[in-house]
Amino acid sequence: MKSLRKTLTFEVAERMDFVNITREVEDALRESGVQEGLCLVNAMHITASVFINDDEPGLHEDYKRWLEWLAPFDASPERYHHNRTGEDNGDAHHKRQVMGREVVVAITDGKLDFGPWEQIFYGEFDGRRPKRVLIKIIGE
């Protein structure tokens, strides 16, 4: 069995934004030489996410509005008890919980086995510092 472990690092300037990382994951898959297997992609930080969806700007704007409605940014310790620790990112933890930590994609004939329009995204909810994404590919 073959395997590859690779990390990507992102420093998103905005507090919340989405980055299409499909090409980077495809590059890692080519590097691995795996033809049949699985590809795990996960955020290595508790205020970031990896998810699969369409690369459509209106959808991404809807996500941002919806997430802000569910867990609005509020640096005060009144809304989020987590902010009583000196942090200001209680909302980011909730947003990550909703959007998820990771995705797993089947590898078939050396390609990510996606449905129509599916792409992989890094979701940042507490930007302005470097964060990592893990890509782990295993298979034959």
Image (cartoon, rainbow, N blue to C red):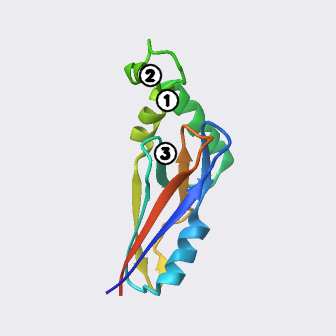
Q: Amino acid at mark 3?
A: Ala
Question: Who comes first in sequence, dot 1 or dot 3?
Answer: 3
Q: Which residue is mark 2?
A: 83
Quadrant in which residue 108 is drawn: bottom left
- Position in image of residue 52 (x %, y %): 49, 56
- Position in image of residue 18 (x %, y %): 60, 48
Q: Is residue 15 left or right of residue 71?
A: right
Residue name at image x 57 percent, y 58 percent: 9
Label 3 crowd bin: few (<14), some (14–19), many (20+), radius 10 Å: many
- Position in image of residue 47 (x %, y %): 47, 40
Identify the image quadrant of the N terminus. Answer: bottom left
Labelled disc at residue 48: 3
Question: Who comes first in sequence, dot 1 or dot 2?
Answer: 2
Marks 1,3: beta carbons within 8 A = no
Quadrant in which residue 8 is drawn: bottom right
Q: Which residue is mark 1?
A: 89
